Amino acid sequence: MAHQLNGLFPQSLLKAFSVLIFIILLKDVCNGQPQLIGPSQVLVARAGDDVILPCHLEPAYDVSAMTLEWTRSSLEPRFVYVSRGSQELEKLKNPSFKGRTSVFVDELKNGNISLKISKVKSDDTGTYRCYVPVLEKEAFVELVVGK
């Protein structure tokens, strides 16, 4: 009997440990936390075109009353778009993006935080961060603008 228990104990311990690791890795999914999703590939645009930087929450989550930030760390100030409660805060925006960025306000209730940049320039090339501070969720979008 003792021999059987010794033989079973390591296997059951290994199974329990595997299940625990699985639960830890999937904790955000298991507790219903939405995930911020961006594109898996680099976006390429031509100078002068309008481009949409995709970013959305899965499952859909209403962010219309939340602070939303789109930033590019290589800029000063770093904000290309920032809003609180669906109201854009133009005064925080980098001057080179004034009048050129927007989100789809009607889609915020569905978790769509995609950013539209109008008339892109080669200087717009870079990595953009989509961030929802209250959820502590972020996604990155890399944009390359050609001539």
Image (tube, grey):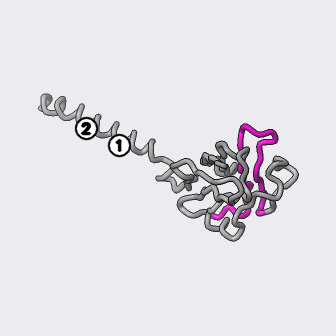
Write down the quadrant of residue 54 in the picture.
bottom right
Q: Is residue 117 magenta?
A: no
Viewer-proximal residue, 140 or 30?
140
**How many residues crowd around disc 2 within 10 Å: few (fewer than 14), some, or many (20 or more)?**
few
Which residue does the numbered mark 1 point to in the structure image?
19
Quadrant housing the N terminus: top left
Viewer-proximal residue, 22 or 17?
22
Which residue does the numbered mark 2 point to in the structure image?
12
44 sits to left or right of 12: right
Q: Is residue 63 magenta?
A: yes
| Amino acid at circle 1 | Val
Identify which residue is drawn at 63% across, 55% down. 53
Query: In this rendering, is residue 120 above or below 19?
Result: below
Image coords of residue 122 (percent x, y): 70, 46
Query: In this rendering, is residue 102 above or below 142?
Result: below
| Amino acid at circle 2 | Ser
Identify which residue is drawn at 54% across, 52% down. 39
The boundaries of the magenta stretch are 62-86
Write down the quadrant of residue 62 in the picture.
bottom right
Image coords of residue 70 (percent x, y): 71, 50
Image coords of residue 51 (percent x, y): 66, 58
